[in-house]
Protein backbone atom coordinates (compact mmCIF):
# COMPACT_ATOMS: atom_id res chain seq x y z
CA UNK A 1 0.00 0.00 0.00
CA UNK A 2 1.11 3.56 -0.78
CA UNK A 3 2.57 5.45 2.18
CA UNK A 4 0.67 8.54 1.02
CA UNK A 5 -2.62 6.71 1.61
CA UNK A 6 -1.68 5.77 5.15
CA UNK A 7 -3.31 8.78 6.84
CA UNK A 8 -6.62 8.20 5.08
CA UNK A 9 -6.49 4.50 5.90
CA UNK A 10 -5.97 5.14 9.62
CA UNK A 11 -8.74 7.72 9.54
CA UNK A 12 -11.12 5.18 8.02
CA UNK A 13 -10.09 2.57 10.57
CA UNK A 14 -10.86 4.99 13.40
CA UNK A 15 -14.24 5.80 11.97
CA UNK A 16 -15.10 2.10 11.88
CA UNK A 17 -14.01 1.73 15.50
CA UNK A 18 -16.08 4.73 16.56
CA UNK A 19 -19.09 3.23 14.81
CA UNK A 20 -18.58 0.03 16.77
CA UNK A 21 -17.32 -1.92 13.74
CA UNK A 22 -14.28 -3.13 15.60
CA UNK A 23 -13.47 -6.03 13.31
CA UNK A 24 -13.19 -3.84 10.21
CA UNK A 25 -11.30 -1.21 12.18
CA UNK A 26 -8.87 -3.85 13.43
CA UNK A 27 -8.37 -5.15 9.88
CA UNK A 28 -7.58 -1.71 8.46
CA UNK A 29 -5.29 -0.92 11.35
CA UNK A 30 -3.58 -4.25 10.62
CA UNK A 31 -3.00 -3.07 7.02
CA UNK A 32 -1.58 0.19 8.32
CA UNK A 33 0.73 -1.72 10.67
CA UNK A 34 1.98 -3.77 7.69
CA UNK A 35 2.73 -0.65 5.65
CA UNK A 36 4.60 1.00 8.47
CA UNK A 37 6.53 -2.18 9.20
CA UNK A 38 7.69 -2.15 5.58
CA UNK A 39 8.81 1.47 6.00
CA UNK A 40 10.81 0.54 9.09
CA UNK A 41 12.48 -2.33 7.27
CA UNK A 42 13.26 -0.13 4.32
CA UNK A 43 14.78 2.54 6.55
CA UNK A 44 16.83 -0.02 8.45
CA UNK A 45 18.30 -1.14 5.18
CA UNK A 46 19.21 2.50 4.43
CA UNK A 47 16.54 2.55 1.75
CA UNK A 48 15.21 6.08 2.36
CA UNK A 49 18.33 7.50 0.79
CA UNK A 50 17.81 6.06 -2.65
CA UNK A 51 14.18 6.98 -2.77
CA UNK A 52 14.41 10.36 -1.14
CA UNK A 53 15.03 12.09 -4.44
CA UNK A 54 16.53 15.26 -3.03
CA UNK A 55 20.03 13.90 -3.35
CA UNK A 56 19.75 12.52 -6.79
CA UNK A 57 19.25 8.93 -7.76
CA UNK A 58 22.76 7.77 -7.05
CA UNK A 59 23.47 5.04 -4.52
CA UNK A 60 24.72 6.02 -1.07
CA UNK A 61 28.24 4.81 -1.70
CA UNK A 62 28.59 7.18 -4.60
CA UNK A 63 27.98 10.29 -2.45
CA UNK A 64 30.80 12.30 -0.82
CA UNK A 65 31.63 11.11 2.70
CA UNK A 66 30.13 14.02 4.70
CA UNK A 67 26.84 13.65 2.79
CA UNK A 68 26.86 9.94 3.55
CA UNK A 69 27.06 10.76 7.26
CA UNK A 70 24.22 13.28 7.01
CA UNK A 71 22.10 10.71 5.27
CA UNK A 72 22.88 8.07 7.86
CA UNK A 73 21.62 10.43 10.59
CA UNK A 74 18.51 11.44 8.66
CA UNK A 75 17.77 7.86 7.83
CA UNK A 76 18.00 6.93 11.51
CA UNK A 77 15.67 9.77 12.47
CA UNK A 78 13.15 8.65 9.87
CA UNK A 79 13.35 5.06 11.12
CA UNK A 80 12.76 6.23 14.69
CA UNK A 81 9.72 8.18 13.60
CA UNK A 82 8.29 5.21 11.74
CA UNK A 83 8.96 2.98 14.73
CA UNK A 84 6.97 5.33 16.97
CA UNK A 85 4.12 5.32 14.48
CA UNK A 86 4.30 1.54 14.34
CA UNK A 87 4.07 1.27 18.12
CA UNK A 88 1.07 3.60 18.29
CA UNK A 89 -0.74 1.81 15.48
CA UNK A 90 -0.14 -1.60 17.01
CA UNK A 91 -1.55 -0.33 20.27
CA UNK A 92 -4.61 1.02 18.51
CA UNK A 93 -5.13 -2.24 16.60
CA UNK A 94 -4.74 -4.28 19.80
CA UNK A 95 -7.24 -2.05 21.56
CA UNK A 96 -9.83 -2.56 18.80
CA UNK A 97 -9.24 -6.30 19.12
CA UNK A 98 -9.54 -6.15 22.89
CA UNK A 99 -12.83 -4.25 22.71
CA UNK A 100 -14.18 -6.65 20.07
CA UNK A 101 -13.21 -9.66 22.17
CA UNK A 102 -14.67 -8.12 25.32
CA UNK A 103 -17.97 -7.41 23.59
CA UNK A 104 -18.06 -10.84 21.99
CA UNK A 105 -17.34 -12.39 25.37
CA UNK A 106 -20.16 -10.42 26.90
CA UNK A 107 -22.65 -11.36 24.20
CA UNK A 108 -21.63 -14.97 24.52
CA UNK A 109 -22.39 -14.95 28.25
CA UNK A 110 -25.87 -16.40 28.67
CA UNK A 111 -28.07 -14.00 30.61
CA UNK A 112 -29.37 -16.67 32.92
CA UNK A 113 -25.96 -17.76 34.01
CA UNK A 114 -25.01 -14.14 34.70
CA UNK A 115 -27.95 -13.65 36.98
CA UNK A 116 -27.51 -17.03 38.58
CA UNK A 117 -27.01 -16.82 42.31
CA UNK A 118 -24.16 -19.27 42.18
CA UNK A 119 -22.21 -17.39 39.54
CA UNK A 120 -18.96 -15.98 40.79
CA UNK A 121 -17.97 -12.64 39.23
CA UNK A 122 -14.49 -13.84 38.39
CA UNK A 123 -15.34 -17.30 37.04
CA UNK A 124 -14.01 -16.31 33.63
CA UNK A 125 -11.92 -13.49 32.34
CA UNK A 126 -14.84 -11.85 30.52
CA UNK A 127 -16.45 -11.15 33.87
CA UNK A 128 -13.34 -9.88 35.60
CA UNK A 129 -13.64 -6.12 36.13
CA UNK A 130 -11.38 -4.02 33.89
CA UNK A 131 -9.38 -2.82 36.89
CA UNK A 132 -8.71 -6.40 37.91
CA UNK A 133 -7.80 -7.50 34.39
CA UNK A 134 -5.27 -4.69 34.18
CA UNK A 135 -3.87 -5.73 37.50
CA UNK A 136 -3.44 -9.27 36.15
CA UNK A 137 -1.87 -8.07 32.93
CA UNK A 138 0.56 -5.75 34.60
CA UNK A 139 1.59 -8.17 37.33
CA UNK A 140 5.15 -9.24 36.57
CA UNK A 141 5.94 -12.92 37.16
CA UNK A 142 6.93 -13.56 40.77
CA UNK A 143 10.65 -13.27 41.26
CA UNK A 144 12.70 -15.98 42.85
CA UNK A 145 12.66 -15.48 46.60
CA UNK A 146 9.88 -12.91 46.49
CA UNK A 147 6.77 -14.52 47.90
CA UNK A 148 3.66 -13.28 46.14
CA UNK A 149 1.02 -14.75 48.38
CA UNK A 150 -1.39 -12.51 50.17
CA UNK A 151 -1.72 -10.25 47.15
CA UNK A 152 1.27 -8.14 48.13
CA UNK A 153 4.72 -8.65 46.68
CA UNK A 154 7.61 -8.01 49.02
CA UNK A 155 11.01 -7.28 47.63
CA UNK A 156 14.20 -7.05 49.62
CA UNK A 157 14.09 -3.29 49.14
CA UNK A 158 10.54 -2.98 50.50
CA UNK A 159 10.34 -0.22 53.01
CA UNK A 160 7.47 0.45 55.38
CA UNK A 161 5.12 2.69 53.43
CA UNK A 162 4.18 6.08 54.72
CA UNK A 163 0.42 6.26 54.26
CA UNK A 164 -0.75 8.99 51.99
CA UNK A 165 -3.07 11.60 53.40
CA UNK A 166 -6.15 11.95 51.24
CA UNK A 167 -7.15 15.44 50.19
CA UNK A 168 -8.76 16.73 53.31
CA UNK A 169 -10.66 19.79 54.32
CA UNK A 170 -7.53 21.49 55.50
CA UNK A 171 -5.96 21.15 52.10
CA UNK A 172 -9.07 21.75 50.09
CA UNK A 173 -8.84 25.51 49.85
CA UNK A 174 -5.24 25.44 48.69
CA UNK A 175 -6.01 22.64 46.27
CA UNK A 176 -8.88 24.71 44.96
CA UNK A 177 -6.67 27.77 44.56
CA UNK A 178 -4.15 25.71 42.68
CA UNK A 179 -6.86 24.30 40.52
CA UNK A 180 -8.32 27.59 39.51
CA UNK A 181 -4.91 29.11 38.89
CA UNK A 182 -4.13 26.36 36.43
CA UNK A 183 -7.43 26.30 34.66
CA UNK A 184 -5.76 26.04 31.30
CA UNK A 185 -4.15 22.81 32.22
CA UNK A 186 -6.63 20.87 34.26
CA UNK A 187 -5.19 17.46 33.43
CA UNK A 188 -1.90 18.75 34.75
CA UNK A 189 -3.42 20.09 37.90
CA UNK A 190 -5.17 16.86 38.80
CA UNK A 191 -2.05 14.90 38.07
CA UNK A 192 -0.06 17.35 40.17
CA UNK A 193 -2.51 17.06 42.99
CA UNK A 194 -2.38 13.30 42.86
CA UNK A 195 1.37 13.31 42.70
CA UNK A 196 1.70 15.87 45.44
CA UNK A 197 -0.69 14.10 47.74
CA UNK A 198 0.64 10.62 47.37
CA UNK A 199 4.09 10.58 45.97
CA UNK A 200 3.02 7.45 44.12
CA UNK A 201 1.69 6.74 40.68
CA UNK A 202 -2.04 6.47 40.33
CA UNK A 203 -4.20 3.36 40.33
CA UNK A 204 -4.46 0.00 42.00
CA UNK A 205 -2.60 -1.63 39.14
CA UNK A 206 0.53 0.29 40.01
CA UNK A 207 0.22 -0.06 43.76
CA UNK A 208 1.49 -3.07 45.62
CA UNK A 209 -1.53 -3.04 47.91
CA UNK A 210 -4.52 -5.06 46.77
CA UNK A 211 -7.05 -2.82 48.47
CA UNK A 212 -7.21 0.83 49.38
CA UNK A 213 -7.55 -0.06 53.05
CA UNK A 214 -4.31 -2.00 52.83
CA UNK A 215 -2.71 0.83 50.90
CA UNK A 216 -3.64 3.29 53.64
CA UNK A 217 -2.66 1.07 56.55
CA UNK A 218 -1.56 3.21 59.48
CA UNK A 219 -3.43 6.32 58.34
CA UNK A 220 -5.14 8.25 61.14
CA UNK A 221 -8.29 8.13 58.97
CA UNK A 222 -8.28 4.37 58.64
CA UNK A 223 -11.69 3.98 60.34
CA UNK A 224 -13.32 6.39 57.91
CA UNK A 225 -11.58 4.63 55.03
CA UNK A 226 -12.85 1.25 56.17
CA UNK A 227 -16.34 2.65 56.59
CA UNK A 228 -16.36 4.05 53.05
CA UNK A 229 -14.90 0.93 51.51
CA UNK A 230 -17.39 -1.35 53.26
CA UNK A 231 -20.53 0.76 52.73
CA UNK A 232 -20.03 2.39 49.34
CA UNK A 233 -17.76 0.25 47.22
CA UNK A 234 -19.04 -2.60 45.08
CA UNK A 235 -16.37 -4.26 43.00
CA UNK A 236 -18.69 -6.18 40.74
CA UNK A 237 -22.29 -5.25 40.06
CA UNK A 238 -24.70 -7.45 38.22
CA UNK A 239 -27.43 -5.19 36.93
CA UNK A 240 -28.43 -6.06 33.41
CA UNK A 241 -29.57 -3.34 31.03
CA UNK A 242 -32.21 -5.81 29.77
CA UNK A 243 -33.87 -5.56 33.19
CA UNK A 244 -34.54 -1.88 32.55
CA UNK A 245 -37.71 -1.18 30.63
CA UNK A 246 -37.65 1.51 27.93
CA UNK A 247 -35.32 4.51 28.36
CA UNK A 248 -33.50 3.62 25.12
CA UNK A 249 -32.47 7.24 24.52
CA UNK A 250 -31.02 7.60 28.03
CA UNK A 251 -29.20 4.27 27.72
CA UNK A 252 -27.58 5.40 24.48
CA UNK A 253 -26.47 8.76 25.85
CA UNK A 254 -25.04 7.05 28.93
CA UNK A 255 -23.15 4.53 26.81
CA UNK A 256 -21.58 7.32 24.85
CA UNK A 257 -20.80 9.34 27.94
CA UNK A 258 -19.54 6.55 30.17
CA UNK A 259 -19.06 3.17 28.50
CA UNK A 260 -17.19 4.01 25.30
CA UNK A 261 -14.63 6.33 26.93
CA UNK A 262 -13.81 3.49 29.32
CA UNK A 263 -13.42 1.01 26.49
CA UNK A 264 -11.47 3.27 24.14
CA UNK A 265 -9.74 5.94 26.23
CA UNK A 266 -7.33 6.76 23.39
CA UNK A 267 -10.12 8.22 21.32
CA UNK A 268 -11.54 10.33 24.08
CA UNK A 269 -8.85 12.95 24.48
CA UNK A 270 -8.66 16.70 23.91
CA UNK A 271 -11.97 18.13 22.78
CA UNK A 272 -13.38 14.58 22.84
CA UNK A 273 -12.50 14.12 26.51
CA UNK A 274 -15.16 12.23 28.48
CA UNK A 275 -17.79 14.28 30.26
CA UNK A 276 -16.80 15.24 33.79
CA UNK A 277 -20.10 14.20 35.23
CA UNK A 278 -23.53 13.01 34.20
CA UNK A 279 -26.76 13.97 35.94
CA UNK A 280 -29.87 11.82 35.69
CA UNK A 281 -32.91 13.79 36.72
CA UNK A 282 -36.62 13.12 36.71
CA UNK A 283 -39.55 11.98 38.83
CA UNK A 284 -38.94 9.44 41.59
CA UNK A 285 -38.93 5.75 40.78
CA UNK A 286 -38.18 6.03 37.08
CA UNK A 287 -35.04 3.87 37.10
CA UNK A 288 -32.24 6.42 37.55
CA UNK A 289 -30.38 4.29 40.08
CA UNK A 290 -30.89 1.15 38.02
CA UNK A 291 -29.49 2.89 34.94
CA UNK A 292 -26.39 4.07 36.79
CA UNK A 293 -25.78 0.57 38.12
CA UNK A 294 -26.33 -1.09 34.77
CA UNK A 295 -23.88 1.17 32.97
CA UNK A 296 -21.28 0.55 35.68
CA UNK A 297 -21.90 -3.22 35.32
CA UNK A 298 -21.37 -2.97 31.57
CA UNK A 299 -18.10 -1.11 32.08
CA UNK A 300 -17.15 -3.60 34.79
CA UNK A 301 -15.74 -0.74 36.78
CA UNK A 302 -15.73 -0.42 40.54
CA UNK A 303 -18.94 1.26 41.62
CA UNK A 304 -19.25 3.63 44.56
CA UNK A 305 -22.89 4.03 45.53
CA UNK A 306 -23.05 7.12 47.67
CA UNK A 307 -26.24 7.84 49.55
CA UNK A 308 -25.96 11.44 50.62
CA UNK A 309 -26.84 10.65 54.23
CA UNK A 310 -23.72 8.47 54.41
CA UNK A 311 -21.60 11.55 53.76
CA UNK A 312 -22.85 13.51 56.71
CA UNK A 313 -21.05 13.30 59.99
CA UNK A 314 -21.62 15.08 63.24
CA UNK A 315 -17.88 15.56 63.65
CA UNK A 316 -16.44 18.81 62.38
CA UNK A 317 -14.51 18.47 59.17
CA UNK A 318 -15.26 14.79 58.80
CA UNK A 319 -17.83 15.03 55.99
CA UNK A 320 -15.53 16.85 53.57
CA UNK A 321 -12.73 14.50 54.55
CA UNK A 322 -15.01 11.62 53.53
CA UNK A 323 -15.54 13.26 50.14
CA UNK A 324 -11.77 13.52 49.71
CA UNK A 325 -11.23 9.90 50.70
CA UNK A 326 -14.02 8.75 48.42
CA UNK A 327 -12.49 10.34 45.31
CA UNK A 328 -9.04 9.23 46.31
CA UNK A 329 -10.26 5.66 46.68
CA UNK A 330 -12.03 5.91 43.32
CA UNK A 331 -8.76 6.98 41.69
CA UNK A 332 -6.98 4.09 43.38
CA UNK A 333 -9.46 1.59 41.94
CA UNK A 334 -9.84 3.43 38.59
CA UNK A 335 -11.55 2.91 36.25
CA UNK A 336 -14.43 3.51 38.58
CA UNK A 337 -17.81 5.17 38.82
CA UNK A 338 -19.00 7.29 41.72
CA UNK A 339 -22.77 7.50 41.90
CA UNK A 340 -24.31 10.19 44.10
CA UNK A 341 -27.93 9.34 44.72
CA UNK A 342 -30.10 12.34 45.61
CA UNK A 343 -27.23 14.69 45.02
CA UNK A 344 -29.47 17.67 45.78
CA UNK A 345 -29.25 16.86 49.47
CA UNK A 346 -25.50 17.48 49.57
CA UNK A 347 -25.20 19.89 46.64
CA UNK A 348 -28.05 22.35 46.98
CA UNK A 349 -27.50 26.01 46.08
CA UNK A 350 -24.83 27.67 48.22
CA UNK A 351 -25.20 30.94 50.05
CA UNK A 352 -28.77 30.50 51.34
CA UNK A 353 -29.55 31.97 54.75
CA UNK A 354 -30.22 28.50 56.16
CA UNK A 355 -27.05 26.99 54.82
CA UNK A 356 -24.80 25.46 57.42
CA UNK A 357 -21.09 26.16 57.21
CA UNK A 358 -20.26 22.43 57.25
CA UNK A 359 -22.51 21.88 54.27
CA UNK A 360 -20.74 24.66 52.35
CA UNK A 361 -17.39 23.02 53.05
CA UNK A 362 -18.64 19.67 51.74
CA UNK A 363 -19.80 21.36 48.52
CA UNK A 364 -16.45 23.12 48.07
CA UNK A 365 -14.64 19.83 48.52
CA UNK A 366 -16.98 18.15 46.04
CA UNK A 367 -16.29 20.88 43.45
CA UNK A 368 -12.56 20.54 43.95
CA UNK A 369 -12.68 16.80 43.61
CA UNK A 370 -14.90 16.90 40.55
CA UNK A 371 -12.38 19.17 38.87
CA UNK A 372 -9.70 16.65 39.66
CA UNK A 373 -11.31 13.55 38.16
CA UNK A 374 -9.20 12.19 35.38
CA UNK A 375 -10.91 12.99 32.13
CA UNK A 376 -8.61 12.04 29.31
CA UNK A 377 -7.56 8.48 28.63
CA UNK A 378 -3.83 8.25 29.13
CA UNK A 379 -1.30 7.52 26.42
CA UNK A 380 -0.64 4.01 27.64
CA UNK A 381 -4.18 3.18 26.66
CA UNK A 382 -5.33 2.14 30.10
CA UNK A 383 -8.70 3.43 31.13
CA UNK A 384 -8.04 5.24 34.39
CA UNK A 385 -11.12 7.34 34.38
CA UNK A 386 -13.28 8.16 37.36
CA UNK A 387 -16.79 8.90 36.18
CA UNK A 388 -19.18 10.88 38.35
CA UNK A 389 -22.84 10.00 37.95
CA UNK A 390 -25.51 11.70 39.98
CA UNK A 391 -29.26 11.43 40.30
CA UNK A 392 -31.88 13.81 41.62
CA UNK A 393 -35.61 14.35 41.74
CA UNK A 394 -35.06 18.03 42.49
CA UNK A 395 -32.70 19.35 39.80
CA UNK A 396 -33.79 22.96 40.41
CA UNK A 397 -32.29 22.80 43.91
CA UNK A 398 -28.78 22.07 42.66
CA UNK A 399 -25.91 24.43 43.18
CA UNK A 400 -25.00 26.22 39.91
CA UNK A 401 -21.34 25.23 40.04
CA UNK A 402 -22.16 21.57 40.64
CA UNK A 403 -24.72 21.66 37.87
CA UNK A 404 -22.09 23.05 35.49
CA UNK A 405 -19.74 20.20 36.34
CA UNK A 406 -22.45 17.65 35.61
CA UNK A 407 -22.03 18.42 31.94
CA UNK A 408 -24.51 15.87 30.62
CA UNK A 409 -27.97 16.27 32.08
CA UNK A 410 -30.32 13.52 31.04
CA UNK A 411 -34.05 13.54 31.69
CA UNK A 412 -35.44 10.22 32.86
CA UNK A 413 -39.18 10.59 32.31
CA UNK A 414 -42.15 8.49 33.34
CA UNK A 415 -42.43 5.38 31.15
CA UNK A 416 -44.45 5.63 27.94
CA UNK A 417 -47.03 3.05 26.86
CA UNK A 418 -44.49 0.49 25.59
CA UNK A 419 -42.29 1.09 28.61
CA UNK A 420 -45.20 0.39 30.95
CA UNK A 421 -46.10 -2.83 29.15
CA UNK A 422 -42.46 -3.94 29.43
CA UNK A 423 -42.39 -2.96 33.11
CA UNK A 424 -45.41 -5.18 33.82
CA UNK A 425 -43.65 -8.04 32.02
CA UNK A 426 -40.39 -7.55 33.92
CA UNK A 427 -42.10 -7.17 37.30
CA UNK A 428 -44.19 -10.33 36.89
CA UNK A 429 -41.38 -12.43 35.45
CA UNK A 430 -41.05 -14.49 38.61
CA UNK A 431 -44.72 -15.26 39.26
CA UNK A 432 -47.06 -17.65 37.46
CA UNK A 433 -49.54 -15.75 35.32
CA UNK A 434 -52.99 -16.77 34.09
CA UNK A 435 -53.51 -16.83 30.33
CA UNK A 436 -55.81 -13.82 30.46
CA UNK A 437 -53.09 -11.35 31.45
CA UNK A 438 -52.98 -8.61 28.81
CA UNK A 439 -49.94 -6.33 29.15
CA UNK A 440 -51.16 -3.87 26.51
CA UNK A 441 -54.39 -3.31 28.42
CA UNK A 442 -52.48 -2.88 31.68
CA UNK A 443 -50.26 -0.28 29.98
CA UNK A 444 -53.42 1.57 28.83
CA UNK A 445 -54.70 1.62 32.40
CA UNK A 446 -51.49 2.81 34.04
CA UNK A 447 -50.80 6.11 32.32
CA UNK A 448 -48.87 8.40 34.71
CA UNK A 449 -47.40 5.52 36.77
CA UNK A 450 -43.65 5.39 37.35
CA UNK A 451 -41.57 2.20 37.13
CA UNK A 452 -41.55 1.95 40.92
CA UNK A 453 -45.37 2.39 40.99
CA UNK A 454 -45.82 -0.44 38.49
CA UNK A 455 -43.48 -2.65 40.50
CA UNK A 456 -45.68 -1.89 43.53
CA UNK A 457 -48.81 -2.74 41.57
CA UNK A 458 -47.36 -6.10 40.56
CA UNK A 459 -46.24 -6.75 44.13
CA UNK A 460 -49.74 -6.04 45.37
CA UNK A 461 -51.34 -8.14 42.61
CA UNK A 462 -49.07 -11.10 43.31
CA UNK A 463 -50.35 -11.17 46.92
CA UNK A 464 -54.00 -11.38 45.91
CA UNK A 465 -54.31 -15.09 44.97
CA UNK A 466 -52.51 -16.01 48.20
CA UNK A 467 -54.89 -13.84 50.21
CA UNK A 468 -57.80 -15.62 48.50
CA UNK A 469 -56.46 -19.03 49.46
CA UNK A 470 -55.90 -17.91 53.05
CA UNK A 471 -59.45 -16.57 53.23
CA UNK A 472 -60.90 -19.80 51.80
CA UNK A 473 -58.87 -21.91 54.23
CA UNK A 474 -60.07 -19.86 57.19
CA UNK A 475 -63.70 -20.19 56.17
CA UNK A 476 -63.34 -23.93 55.63
CA UNK A 477 -61.68 -24.55 59.01
CA UNK A 478 -64.11 -22.27 60.87
CA UNK A 479 -67.06 -24.06 59.20
CA UNK A 480 -65.68 -27.31 60.64
CA UNK A 481 -65.49 -25.73 64.10
CA UNK A 482 -61.72 -25.25 64.09
CA UNK A 483 -59.95 -22.22 65.62
CA UNK A 484 -56.82 -20.19 64.89
CA UNK A 485 -54.49 -23.06 65.73
CA UNK A 486 -56.17 -25.35 63.16
CA UNK A 487 -56.16 -22.61 60.53
CA UNK A 488 -52.38 -22.18 60.89
CA UNK A 489 -51.79 -25.95 60.78
CA UNK A 490 -53.90 -26.24 57.59
CA UNK A 491 -51.94 -23.40 55.95
CA UNK A 492 -48.65 -25.09 56.75
CA UNK A 493 -49.95 -28.30 55.22
CA UNK A 494 -51.17 -26.43 52.16
CA UNK A 495 -47.73 -24.92 51.53
CA UNK A 496 -46.19 -28.41 51.64
CA UNK A 497 -48.82 -30.04 49.42
CA UNK A 498 -48.89 -27.22 46.86
CA UNK A 499 -45.43 -25.62 46.81
CA UNK A 500 -45.97 -23.66 43.56
CA UNK A 501 -47.81 -20.44 44.32
CA UNK A 502 -51.23 -19.76 42.80
CA UNK A 503 -51.23 -17.82 39.48
CA UNK A 504 -51.95 -14.10 39.16
CA UNK A 505 -54.76 -13.07 36.80
CA UNK A 506 -55.68 -9.93 34.89
CA UNK A 507 -58.34 -9.08 37.48
CA UNK A 508 -55.72 -9.14 40.25
CA UNK A 509 -53.56 -6.69 38.34
CA UNK A 510 -56.46 -4.38 37.51
CA UNK A 511 -57.60 -4.47 41.13
CA UNK A 512 -54.08 -3.66 42.31
CA UNK A 513 -54.03 -0.68 39.92
CA UNK A 514 -57.01 0.79 41.73
CA UNK A 515 -55.29 0.30 45.10
CA UNK A 516 -51.87 1.74 44.21
CA UNK A 517 -52.03 5.31 42.95
CA UNK A 518 -49.45 7.03 40.79
CA UNK A 519 -46.88 8.80 42.96
CA UNK A 520 -46.06 11.59 40.51
CA UNK A 521 -48.34 14.57 40.02
CA UNK A 522 -48.93 16.43 36.75
CA UNK A 523 -47.60 19.69 38.23
CA UNK A 524 -44.25 18.06 38.97
CA UNK A 525 -43.98 16.87 35.38
CA UNK A 526 -44.32 20.36 33.95
CA UNK A 527 -41.59 21.53 36.36
CA UNK A 528 -39.21 18.85 35.03
CA UNK A 529 -40.10 19.81 31.48
CA UNK A 530 -39.32 23.46 32.18
CA UNK A 531 -35.97 22.58 33.80
CA UNK A 532 -35.12 20.28 30.90
CA UNK A 533 -35.73 23.09 28.44
CA UNK A 534 -33.56 25.48 30.41
CA UNK A 535 -30.69 23.26 31.54
CA UNK A 536 -31.01 19.84 29.90
CA UNK A 537 -27.92 18.66 27.99
CA UNK A 538 -28.33 15.28 26.35
N1 LIG B 1 -37.25 1.56 33.75
C1 LIG B 1 -37.39 0.64 34.70
N2 LIG B 1 -37.23 -0.67 34.40
C2 LIG B 1 -37.36 -1.62 35.34
N3 LIG B 1 -37.67 -1.36 36.63
C3 LIG B 1 -37.85 -0.08 36.98
C4 LIG B 1 -37.69 0.98 36.05
N4 LIG B 1 -37.92 2.14 36.67
C5 LIG B 1 -38.19 1.83 37.94
N5 LIG B 1 -38.15 0.50 38.14
C6 LIG B 1 -38.44 -0.18 39.40
O1 LIG B 1 -38.51 0.82 40.41
C7 LIG B 1 -37.55 0.59 41.43
C8 LIG B 1 -36.89 1.91 41.79
O2 LIG B 1 -36.04 2.30 40.71
P1 LIG B 1 -34.84 3.28 40.92
O3 LIG B 1 -34.39 3.23 42.34
O4 LIG B 1 -33.83 3.03 39.87
O5 LIG B 1 -35.56 4.65 40.65
P2 LIG B 1 -34.99 6.10 40.88
O6 LIG B 1 -35.39 6.89 39.70
O7 LIG B 1 -33.54 6.06 41.21
O8 LIG B 1 -35.84 6.53 42.14
P3 LIG B 1 -35.54 7.70 43.21
O9 LIG B 1 -35.46 8.96 42.42
O10 LIG B 1 -36.73 7.66 44.08
O11 LIG B 1 -34.26 7.34 43.88
C9 LIG B 1 -36.58 -0.41 40.86
O12 LIG B 1 -36.08 -1.24 41.86
C10 LIG B 1 -37.41 -1.16 39.86
O13 LIG B 1 -38.10 -2.20 40.52
Image (cartoon, rainbow, N blue to C red):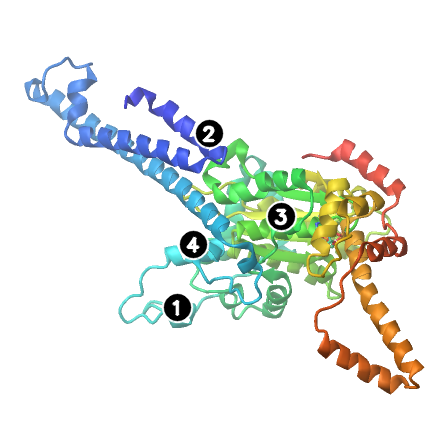
Judged from this view, the residue extending furthest toward the left is 62
Ligand 1 within 8 A of label 2's CB? no
Q: Earlier in the sequence, mark 3 or mark 1?
A: 1
Give the distance between the C-alpha atoms of the residues marked 2 and 3, in whole angstroms: 27 Å
Of badges 2 and 3, the one in the foreground is 2
Q: Find numbered disc 1 in the image and state the secondary structure of the residue it sits on.
A: loop
Question: CA gap, disc 1 to disc 4?
Answer: 25 Å
Question: Which residue is depicted at the point 73% across and 66% down?
Answer: 315
Horizontally, residue 460 falls left or right of residue 313, namely: right
The residue to which callout 1 is attached is: 159
Residue 375 in view (yes/no): no
* Residue located at (89% from left, 78% from top): 476
> Which quarter shows the N terminus?
top left
Of residue 45 and residue 366, the one placed in the foreground of this image is 45
Question: Mark 3: which secondary structure?
Answer: strand
Residue furthest toward the front?
Answer: 480
> Of helix, strand and loop, which one carries label 4?
helix
Q: Are marks 1 and 4 in contact (CB under 8 Å)?
A: no
Tag 2 near tag 3, CB within 8 Å: no
Q: Position of residue 299 (x, y in %)?
A: 54, 49
Please report whichever mark, 2 or 3, sits nearer to the chain's N-terminal start.
2
Location of residue 31 in the rendering, given as x and y in whole percent from the top left corner: 31, 31
In the picture of the structure, the residue carrying the numbered disc 4 is 134
Q: CA distance from mark 3 to mark 1?
A: 35 Å
Q: Which residue is mark 2?
A: 15
Q: Nearer the viewer, mark 3 or mark 1?
A: 3
Residue position for label 3: 388
Mark 4 vs mark 2, CA separation in Å: 26 Å
* Quarter location, residue 511: bottom right
Q: Are marks 4 and 2 in contact (CB under 8 Å)?
A: no
**Residue 77: x and y, percent?**
24, 30
Which callout, 3 or 4, points to the residue nearer the camera?
4
Amino acid sequence: MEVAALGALVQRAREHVLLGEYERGEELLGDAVGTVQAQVRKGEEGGFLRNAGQDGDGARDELPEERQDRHTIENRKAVDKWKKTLKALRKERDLARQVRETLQGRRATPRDSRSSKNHRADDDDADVPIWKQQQHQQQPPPQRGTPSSGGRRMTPSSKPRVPRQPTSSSSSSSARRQNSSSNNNKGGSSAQRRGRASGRRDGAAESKASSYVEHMEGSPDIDLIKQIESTMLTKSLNVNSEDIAGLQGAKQVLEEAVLYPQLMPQYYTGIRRPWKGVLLFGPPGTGKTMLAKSIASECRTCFFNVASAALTSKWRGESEKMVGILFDMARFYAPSTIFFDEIDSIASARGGSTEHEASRRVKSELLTQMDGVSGDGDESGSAKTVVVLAATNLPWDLDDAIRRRLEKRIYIPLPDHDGRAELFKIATREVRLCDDVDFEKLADESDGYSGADITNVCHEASMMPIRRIIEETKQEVHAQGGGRHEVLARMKQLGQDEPSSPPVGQQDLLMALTKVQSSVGGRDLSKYQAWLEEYGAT
